[in-house]
Amino acid sequence: MIPLIADNTIHTLYTDHNVWLRNVLRRRVGCSETAADLAQDVFVRLLGRQYLPAMNEPRAYLATLAHGLLIDHRRRQALESAWLESLSALSEDDVPSPEEQVLIIDALARIDALLSGLKPRVKEVFLLSRLDGKPYPIIARALGVSLSTVEKDMAQALRHCYQVLMG
């Protein structure tokens, strides 16, 4: 690990590899502005760390960080698209204000990140229970599993959420 006593380590990484990283990201997202934002986010993340791992291949390390941010970006885009689609079904009076929409999308993104890593059925059990308010027996019938399986899946989801939230 390299302690980040000074920002010159990140400055060197930035000056040596920022253009390369932006070009890699531009090819993947098809938009230079988005690529520039994602590349900038990579270096902002590095600035937030106390230590940097020793890097024999800095571009591989930067590409790995960028890949994670790109996945987050695409996931958020999908959430925003789904949200906009659901808004189209609402009457004008029921559409939340732009400020509320941003808060809702942020909350959805946090929930999605919290539940990422769960098996699909476990995630579905959690969402059916917590968002739709369905009781366990109805979830079990809907998914074609036993009540015991729903209880175990729910316990697993709650443990996962607790671990993510408590670090």
Image: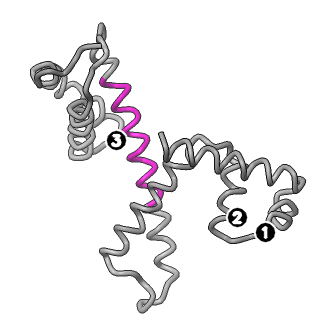
Nearest to the observer: residue 110 or residue 42: 110
Reply above or below: 16 against 22.
above
- Residue 47 place in picture, x, y as percent: 20, 32
Q: Earlier in the sequence, mark 3 or mark 2?
A: 3
Label 2 – label 1 distance at C-alpha: 6 Å
Q: Mark 2 belongs to which amino acid?
A: Ser
Residue 14 occupies which quadrant of the picture? top left
The answer to whether 118 appears left or right of 112 in the picture is right
Label 1 secondary element: loop
57 in relation to 21, above or below: above
* Coordinates of residue 52 in the picture (x, y in percent): 27, 20
Who's the residue at 35% across and 29% down the image? 65
Disc 2 element: helix
Residue lying at the far front in this picture: please name it.
166
Residue placed under numbered mark 1 in the picture: 135
142 and 45: which one is in front?
A: 45
Q: Which amino acid type is shown beneath numbered disc 3?
A: Val
Q: Which residues are magenta?
A: 62-79
Q: Which residue is mark 2?
A: 129
- Residue at the spot x=66%, y=51% of the render? 123
Answer with the quarter of the image where residue 142 lies. bottom right
Please state which of residues 58 and 34 is positioned toward the viewer in this rendering. 58
Residue 121: percent from the left, percent from the top? Answer: 73, 49
The residue that disc 3 covers is: 29
The circle drawn on residue 84 is none
Which numbered disc, 1 or 3, marks the residue that appears first in the sequence?
3
Residue 70, magenta (yes or no):
yes
Q: Pointers 2 and 1 in contact (CB under 8 A)?
A: yes
* Mark 1: amino acid: Pro
Is residue 89 shown left or right of residue 38? right
